[in-house]
Amino acid sequence: MVEVTLWGALSQLAGGKSKVEVEAKDIRELFRKLAEQYPGFEPWIDRGIAVAIDGVIYRDTWGKKLPPGAEIFLLPRLAGG
Amino acid sequence: MNFDPRFSGRKFTSVGTRPVRPDGVDKVTGRARYGADFNMAGQLVGRVLRSPHAHAVIRKIDTSKAEKLSGVKAVITAKDLPDLTDGDAAMYDILDNCMARTKALYDGHAVAAVAAIDARTARQALKLIEVDYEILPHVTDVDEAMQHHAPLINDTIFTEGLEQKPVKPSNVTKRSQFGHGDVHQGFGHADFIVERSFKTEQTHQGYIEPHACVASVSSDGTAELWVCTQGHFVYRQHCAQLLGMEASKLRVTSSEIGGGFGGKTHVWAEPVALALSRKAGRPVKLVMTRDEVFRASGPTSATSIDVKIGARKDGTITAAEATLRYTCGPYAGSWAEIGAMTAFACYRLDNVKTVGYEVLVNRPKTAAYRAPSAPMAAFAVESAVDELAKELGMDPVEFRIKNAAQEGTRSSYGPVYGPIGIGPTLEAVKNHAHMKAPLKKNQGRGMACGFWFNFGGQTCVDLNIGMDGSVSLAVGTVDVGGSRASLSLVAAEELGIDYSQLKAIVADTSSLGYNDMTDGSRGTFSSSMATISAARNAIKILRERAAQMWDIPVDDVVWEHGHAVAKGDKHGNLGKLSLKEIAAKSGTTGGPIAGHSELVADGAGVSFATHICDIEVDPETGAARVIRYTVVQDAGKAVHPTYVEGQYQGGAAQGIGWALNEEYIYGKDGRLQNAGFLDYRIPVCSDLPMIDTQILEIPNPNHPYGVRGVGETSIVPPLAAIANAVSNAAGVRMTHIPMSPPRILAAIEAEREG
Amino acid sequence: MTGIAVSTTINGDTIEYLCQPDETLLDVLRDRLGLTGAKEGCGTGDCGACSVIVDDRLVCSCLVLGAEAEGRRIETVEGMAHGDQLHTLQQKFLEHAALQCGICTPGFLIAAKDLLAKNPDPSEEEIRFGLAGNLCRCTGYDKIVRAVQDAAHVMKGA
């Protein structure tokens, strides 16, 4: 079980909760479970969500493991110059 | 990914040296080929007809007269680019921006295009196209567009991210929020509070090379596109999707690129050129004029930002809050969101809240510009931080050091930081000779900090070893500022060979696997990671071949300083085999030797910079001049330090232009008044001093050599550093960027009149 | 419509071409003669990327008509090196990394060549004002000025 912190927009889709608990071993499973629990997340996941695991931001490595007790943050996927 | 990207702390031989770049001679002899330097047999000239109105319904377009003009081979409108986006809203916006479908949404919006045998005929043909417009009320200002009575740009848009679903459409496409703690409580503990509102005007990346491409579509469904772009693989995907082509049948070659800075990350003219070529059955060259670049490519956001920061007497910030409104042009974007994430990223804050609003206006679709959205947020926040330090009677550097984020700090956008460089850049600034240099009358010194995320992304590299032992490195990230040199250094380092044995190229989309764009400061970070991985894969093969040549087990062969070495006493009689010797025998030991790598380079390290600036203000004219400028920035590891310095200096110069001169000026009619380099004045050589740089190297733990991105952060601090310097020189707080002479003069006069 | 016959000297070679009355020298160089070293950054004489030397005078070739080249002597970036021997300015631009994207480089090299021909020992300020007609968006000009200073030093000694 990992605790995931949501940013403002996702938190509203999760009924105002800023943190949710999910049983997931990697980012792929995390997204799948979140989409099951909160169908409103699905378009956001399709558009791109970045996952910060203990401060390191992952944008595309969906196979990345979520270590137990890790600090997990969801962030918008950004554009760069 | 069978590759360990962790920082290893190795000693370097090639990395950190400063050789001449591999593409250098072509660029000083005029031989290098940029977007407009390429031609195909039978090529036509493409030209685009653009709306002169800021906001208008397109009732009817009559192209019949243009089609009849001798020499015209194709005329297209939105009908020739049917909607194939299949519900993908972002792609639909790109399509509509390439060619207006029902409404023209800004001055310069493409409405039709022609291909003709020469430029003169093409220009004549544009004049023969009749467009019947119904002019609508328009809005170009960010604050006005948010008013409830403002003209609606898209009546299907309802603000996302509000607690209650809105019942009325709005020009605000999205609200986003970041932060932690309780700012209300935090301000309650503050002894001093600074609260101010700021505005910044829209600027353009100002690359010297206008957008240019040559498109050739064959009747068998294959096509070629030569184009200046920051990401030819992304252009291929977008063009293929918009034109209903198979991506692998569209071969995109990236030309040398004459500057991008985020502005060449989006397609505009390319789908139009392909559609023209498809209709005409001939290659079409489409080159934008400078006027078109300003009116119809993607400038940055104009903004309006409120900041509130509170601190205790001892200098501890107790709470920080900002509301940020960013223009997106007429299509939805996430620019304020990025501003809201970056605004307070330099600081350790218990209570912080930022709210961003994305605002539609009748201006061109906003595109990224070097650390997009961060400079405006930093301008507002760092100005307020400076003012707060003054109220506290603290030195601005000491105040920032006291509140700077560090390893373990929860960032204002959420995650906890690993090892970061904000503290070290501030310490370096504190001890820098620049800070102690005396100032003359009417001069002032300012400093400011800046933050940028840096990105990684999908990356693919091929490394091929020729039979003569020379090495070719094919990368897929477009080289915008010397990355072929830095990637050659990385390959030389890993293989243990000399830089001169290598040649790096940027491969086309048919020759290499997919690569994300060169954006987010990712070029050297990502492609160096893939290059290291590819080199290690090649070394594995080189060891196997050496083992064959010696007839010993491969496990007994190690790779040292460019040679295979047999380990163990039993192989004492065996000498070393160089890469060249192994390559020479490759034909009989198993064929060509190559190393490939396909990976996602995640874990780009965040980057911080602190800048110092001295400004002299002429109190009679309001003109401000930069007297001295110093950049201190963390590079993680500077692979080619000269090009890292170049990134620092270039970003600072762009920031200086933004701070003092550059702005889009719209008339009451919603038309851009200054679409040229004469009236949109970017800094010239005589405007600037030398720009001193100091490179810090705090290794990124997620890269084998510790590399972070370096390209973007340097544009984040200048707006605020210069504003703080002007404020110290002229005795007035400047809240509107650019600080052009009339604005400074007005501020001085207002202060005099009290 | 008939073209105008022009005979001119470009980088020491006698060149003849036909051009239209509204064609610029830049159009002729790039589209008729294949000399694409001069670049069009603006078409209005504001960026200097199309700089060439006409009869010892630095000009923006986008502001000169192709027909005006009749009987003139034109120098472009393609004529700066002698065989495989780069001009000192070209060499110094490489050594100092005075280019990033490189689109402005041909214009800067021509402008710097013209500057040093008229003032072999310029101060930093004279270099900055001498090159103020050329826009560079990548470098902040620092390394360009240093390359020109170094080249002037070497050329004086030569």
Image (tube, rainbow, N blue to C red):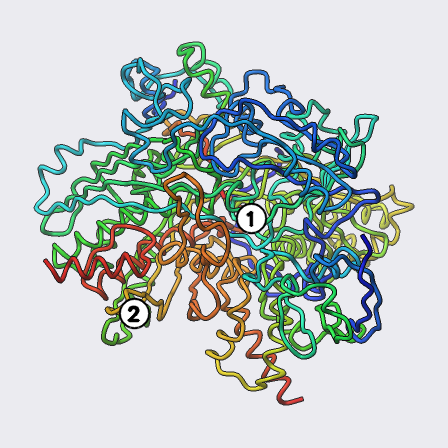
Above/below status of B293 relative to A60: below
Q: Can you identify the residue that label 1 sits on?
A: B260
Nearer to us in this view, B684 or B690: B684
Residue B71 percent across, percent down from the top left: 78, 39
User: Is C42 left or right of B415, judged from the image as shown?
Assistant: right
Nearer to us in this view, B665 or B477: B665
Q: Quadrant of residue B132?
A: top right
Cβ atoms under marks 1 and 2 closer than 8 Å: no
Q: Quadrant of residue A14?
A: top left
Q: Chain of mark 2?
A: B
Residue B62 percent across, percent down from the top left: 64, 26
Residue B617 percent across, percent down from the top left: 28, 68
User: Is C116 left or right of A29, judged from the image as shown?
Assistant: right
- Which mark, residue B364? none
> In the rendered view of the protein, which quadrant contains the C terminus of chain B?
bottom left
Viewer can see residue B590? yes
- Label 1 secondary element: loop
- Disc 1 residue type (three-letter): Gly
- Disc 2 residue type (three-letter): Glu
Residue B145 percent across, percent down from the top left: 33, 31
Above/below status of B173 relative to C56: above
Q: Can you identify the residue that label 2 sits on?
A: B616
Viewer can see residue B508? no
Q: Chain of mark 1?
A: B
The furthest residue to the right: B588
